[in-house]
Structures are given as C-alpha cells and as structure tokens.
Image (tube, helix red, strand yellow):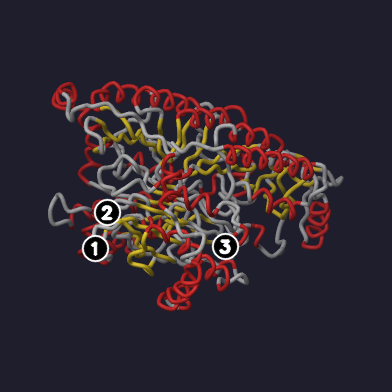
Amino acid sequence: MYVYDEFDWAFLEQRVAEFRDQVRRRLAGELTEDEFKLLRLLNGVYLQLHAYMLRIGIPYGTLSSEQLRALAHVARTYDRGYGHFTTRQNIQFHWIKLEQLPDAMGYLAQHRLHGIQTSGNSIRNVTTDQWAGVTPEEIEDPRIWAELIRQHTTLHPEFSFLPRKFKIAITASAHDRAAIKIHDISLRLYRNAEGEAGFEVGVGGGLGRIPYLAQTIKPFLPRRDLLSYIEAILRVYNQYGRRDNIHKARIKILVHQIGVEKFAEEVEAEWQTIRDGPLALEPSVVAEIATRFRYPAYETLVDNPDALTSARLTDRAFATWFNACVNRHKVRGYAIVTLSLKPEGGTPGDATAEQMDAIADLADRYSCGEIRVGHEQNLVLPNVRQRDLVELWRALDAIGVALPNINLASDIIACPGLDYCSLANARSIPVAQELTRRFRDLDVARNLGRLHINISGCINACGHHHVGHIGILGVEKNGEEFYQVTIGGRADEKAELGALIGPAVPYADVANVVEDIAAAYLELRERSDELFIDTVKRLGVEPFRERVYATRQAG
Amino acid sequence: MTSPLEQKLKVKGPVVVTANRTRDGIVIYRTADAGWTTDLAEAAIVTTTPAAQELLKGAVADDVGAVQAYVAPVEMTADRRVLPGNLRERIRVAGPTIALPVGA
C-alpha cells in the first residue's frame, strides 16, 4: 500500500474544505450552476438522471481493507447501500446528495480517497494491472511509476485545462490486463535486449465516437525519462489539440490528423528541451516513492500444500472455482484470487456495502489487508495463502462473489447505461443481466471458453464495446433502443477493434443475437481449444454474419 | 435517446419542463405557479413551442433551485393521467428499470 505523507494529508484536507465552501456558496446562490459545474467536475461530481454521482479514483486499483470499509460506510450513510466499480479502476456512488457531498468527501479523505481528477478535462486516474506487484509475469511493480505520474499530474497547473480528458495506463507484464492500447498514453514496462528496463510508449488510443488504438512513438524510453517524456506529449497535445469541437478534442484525433510520425517528431523536439531538466528521475526519487509502498511480510510457504491438492481432487465445485478464479503469485505458497462481481441477473461491477465490509474482513484475514480493482469490474484478493483457499472460497461463496465465471460469457463488462447515465441512449445493464441468464450454465460457458462481452449504452464507450470479443453498443432509432453488435475486438496485448456484424437489432433481440454468435462459433471453430477470438481472427466476420443474420434477414 | 439537452426545442404534443433539484439532484417538474414539484401529475403541461419556451425560461431563471432544466414529452391518457413520454423520462420518474442491489 502507498503511505501518505503530511503533504498528502494536508492537501486533501484543504481540498475538502474548499469544496465544502463551494457547495455552501452554490446552495446559497452565490455560485451559478455554470460556475459550479466546473468546480464539481474537478472533484468527480456529475449530475446524472436521478441524482448526483460521485466518482472516486482508486489509484492503480489498489485498496486497503480500511479503505474498502470507508467506501462501504459512504455507500450506507450517503448513498443507497451499494457502489459501482467502473472500467477505469474507479468506484461510483449514484445517489449522492449535493448537500451531503462535503461530509462524504471529508470521510473519504480521512481514508486517502477522493474524486480529484476523476472527471473534467484533466489527467484521470492512472490505471494499471490489478495484479501489479504480485504477478510473477511482471518485471517490476508498475504502481511505483503510476504513483510518480499521479503525483506529477495531480493539479499540474499547465495541464489543468487540457482540450479534453486524458487517460494513462501502464503494465509491466507481457500479458496486458490494463487495456493500455485504448488509452491516450499507453506504457509497457519491459526489458530490452540489453536487459535494461524501460517503457514502450504509445499515444492516441481511445474509444468513443472515433476509436483508435495507441500507436508506439517511443519503442524504448529509459525509466529516468518517464515524466519528461509524458510532459512533452502533454505539451504537444495541449498546444495543438482542438478545443473548438468536443468530438475532435482527444489526442487520438490530433495524432490521426497530423500523423503519428509528425506527432512523434513534435514530442521529440519538445522532449529534448526538458529531458535533462528537473523532471529527469533520479534513482533516489524513485526509491523514495518505492519505499512508500508497503508490501506484506510474506511467510515462507510451499506451493500446492496437501490440503489444497486434496480439495482440488475431491471437491468438484472448489476445483471449478480454483481453475476459474485463482492465479499464480510471485511468492511461493500464495495465490491471486479474483472475486466475481458478475452474479447471474446482477449489475456488472456493483457491490453492496455489506459485501464491501465482508470482503474487507476477508482481505484482513486472508490477503494481508489488500484488495484490488480491475478494469473488468471484478475485485481481487492479491495475497492469499494457498493453504487458505478452501476456507476463503467458502466465505466468498457465502457473500455471492465466488461465481467461477471469470473470463467467461457471463463475466460481462457494462457501463451504467440509460438506467443511470444522462449521456446514454440505451440501457446496458438489463442486456448484461439477460446475457448472464442465457449463459448461466457454466458447462455451456466453459465450452465457449474465454469470451469477453462488453456493453456500452452510448458511443462514449465506457463499457469498452469496441474491444469486446463481442461488443454491444446501444443506439436510439426513432425513440427505441437498438443495439449494434461487433465481434473480434480485444483489449489485451493483441488489441484490436471489433467489426460490425450486421444491422442493429432491437432490445428484445440482442441476447438472441449473442447466443447465435456463440452457436456460430461452436460450429466454425477448428478445435475445441480454438478461442472465439481466434476463430473470428481466422475467418473474419462474414461466416458469423451469414449464420446470425440469415434467418433475421429472411424474417 | 439523444440527450434532451442537445435537442432543439420543437413541441409537437404535450410537454413539461423538468430538471434536477440542486440540493439533492432528484427529479423535479415545473409547476404552473412557477414552483417545482417532484410529482409529474402536478407539473404544468403545455402544448406549443412558445408556451414551452416561456415555461423553460422561468425554470432556467431559477438557477438556485434547479439544475439543467429542459423540455420533456409527456403522454396524456384517456383518464387524464400524465405519463412520461419516452424511456428516458420513464426511467427518471420510476428509477432504474433493474432491481437495485439488496440493501439499496
């Protein structure tokens, strides 16, 4: 866990006091909504269909048990008893009252939580791999670099009014769990042929109305240059990014319009003027940040203790959960455990206050007090002793978060959609809920294998539908909800944008279409272990279109 | 549904003016006596563009009490009940179409 210093505490305290005064002035009529809107957005406060919404950043997806309890308290005291984990390692409360927001924020600040730069045209929460620091795949903990970026870009005076919002993601593993390619800046930490660690830097990723994947502009950036290079990218964007048209203001449009080579040249020129200045990261600075991450005192244990092996052999339900939800840890005798927030008929990413409290307790007992949040809208207990897995599984099952559907068809990513969001054109959640019912049979789902379904209720693409293996986008046609369906997208290290499979279908038919796509895949795959995404890659969209739309067109 | 805030005002049937209450964000409707109500049945209903513009003008002027006022369609039933005119407004009146998590 990252430990605050006195500056961090003072800063948050001042920010809460400032916002409290702003709310007072707004309610007293001393600030107009136009004046106040900018201020509330700086603190993560939106106005949605039914109420204000507070978005709280969870830097690099890491929460302590104490912080999760604080979120549960806010859910219970100031909201309606639940929270919604988003696709960017944030949590949202959808029913919060403006007059109570300062108290809620004050409480959260006591637990190192806030909504600063979770909205508006700012540099948003820096996201990373939810397995950071514990996966054996990574070359080092990317959260240290995420924290450096967070500190540098929080309230950065030069970048407080960017043309548009700006998102940065970082991974240090070969397998990308942070969906870095769909971010304004993508950072992949790796070792080059000489064994030196550095970043592959990409720019211009982003979904929304005009989706692009990030393109590499710096194949290898030494770690010392991370902040200066990001600064150079932001300066070029800040100078040339469009402010006249909100739909063309993201950096992806700039990169596309001037060309990635030209953009890279501009960044390089800017960077050369600052790279050896104060932003050059001395090892002592990085080391100081690293010391403020507290790691558990791991015990000396063995892998696959007898009790675990025995349970896997004798308890089918446990073995199923183990195979779906448990992954290797970098420390022998430990495991990474994913908790599914995708129950049948539930809202993807929602957790009740009771669940949050219970998970916090389980984190204390079984995971060194730590919880992670992934962009897939599930939670993770990152430090579980393998010998405790059976006991933990029973406890997780008792609170409804042990469904073994991770990476299966019912592990759906979905935005809040028209049930909450004032930007949405159509509902997302009921579509997700219906699909969880259609794929409730886990034997059927496992036969389909890894299958990521992403749903967005509007073109802003908070549900990342462009990079879903099956992507569903809600649109409006003559006042009715319709859904466009794409296939072949993916968000990992082989990121691709999906392709439209056919005409939009009405609400009542969208789950049928997805089932038909799944059936077509079973018919088209070469082998039982050829993944859906690989079948689409091999054959393209057409064979799927033929099968899914033949009867619909005929009808 | 395209956000009503982005739509040009063109009234073709019965409409109301709706907004969110500043202090807590809940859905409110403009009344004939220039106040606000949380009950759609008590909302002022107009049927022409000039009348809607006038109602909206008064609503927008109350910047302290209400946020993001706009004109929304309604339907009148045979027994004179007022219903929201599209899905978005139905959701604003009745809440999410899904069951909220237990405890909510």
Mark 3, chain letter?
A
Residue under circle 3? A164
Mark 3 vs 2, N-terminal side: 3
The image quadrant of residue A485 is bottom left
Report the amino acid beneath label 3. Arg
Residue under circle 2? A174
Q: Residue at x 66, y 63 (%)?
A: B7
Tell me residue A106's x, y (percent).
Answer: 64, 34
Element under disc 1 = helix
Mark 2 vs 1, N-terminal side: 2
Residue under circle 1? A537
Mark 2, chain letter?
A
Quick one: label 2, few (<14), some, or many (20+) residues within 10 Å?
some
Tags 3 and 2 both on a single chain? yes
Mark 1 vs 3, N-terminal side: 3
Element under disc 3 = loop
Looking at the rendered image, the disc whose residue lies closer to the viewer, 2 or 1, is: 2
Tell me residue A91's x, y (percent).
Answer: 51, 41
Quick one: label 1, few (<14), some, or many (20+) residues within 10 Å?
few
Looking at the rendered image, the disc whose residue lies closer to the viewer, 1 or 3, is: 3
Would you say A257 lies left or right of B31 here?
left
Q: Are marks 1 and 3 in contact (CB under 8 Å)?
A: no
Q: Is residue A195 above or below residue A245?
A: above
Q: Residue at x 52, y 49 (%)?
A: A151
